[in-house]
């Protein structure tokens, strides 16, 4: 029963996050189309290049 509950929770979270991921991808592709580079999430002090 515990494994079934775990699988249900994982499935529910994936279904809940799918629209969020889709919107994020749409925003990211629109920014790329407009030539706007996304900000890096890496700390500049930690960059090697």
Image: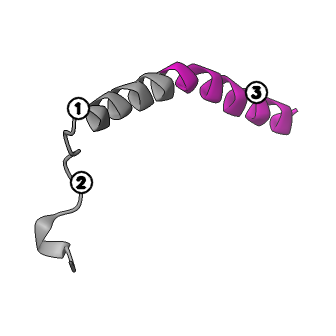
Marks 3 and 1, Cα distance to the nearest angstrom? Answer: 40 Å
Assign a secondary structure to mark 2. loop
Instruction: Give the camera-side residue of 1 and 23.
Output: 23
Assign a secondary structure to mark 1. loop
Marks 2 and 3, Cα distance to the nearest angstrom? Answer: 32 Å
Do residues under tags 2 and 3 come within 8 Å of each other at their CB atoms? no
Q: Badge 1 is on which residue?
A: 34
Comparing labels 2 and 1, the label whose residue is closer to the camera? 1
Question: Residue 41: which disc?
Answer: 2
Q: Residue 26: horizontal and vertical position, in percent?
A: 41, 25
Assign a secondary structure to mark 3. helix
Q: Please tell me which residue is depicted at 64% across the width and 22% down the height of the picture.
A: 15
Magenta span dominant secondary structure: helix
Question: Residue 8: which disc?
Answer: 3
Task: State left or right for residue 3 relative to residue 22.
Answer: right
Near mark 3 (Cα within 10 A), the count class, few <14, some 14-19 or many ≥20, is: few
Q: Please tell me which residue is depicted at 32% across the width and 28% down the height of the picture.
A: 30
Q: Residue 36: horizontal and vertical position, in percent?
A: 19, 39
Question: Residue 20: which disc?
Answer: none
Q: Please tell me which residue is depicted at 43% across the width and 31% down the height of the picture.
A: 25
């Amino acid at each position: 029963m515990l494994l079934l509950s775990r699988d249900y929770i994982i499935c529910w979270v994936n279904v809940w996050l799918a629209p969020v991921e889709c919107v994020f991808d749409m925003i990211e592709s629109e920014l790329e189309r407009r030539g706007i580079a996304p900000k890096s999430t890496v700390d500049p002090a930690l960059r090697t290049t």
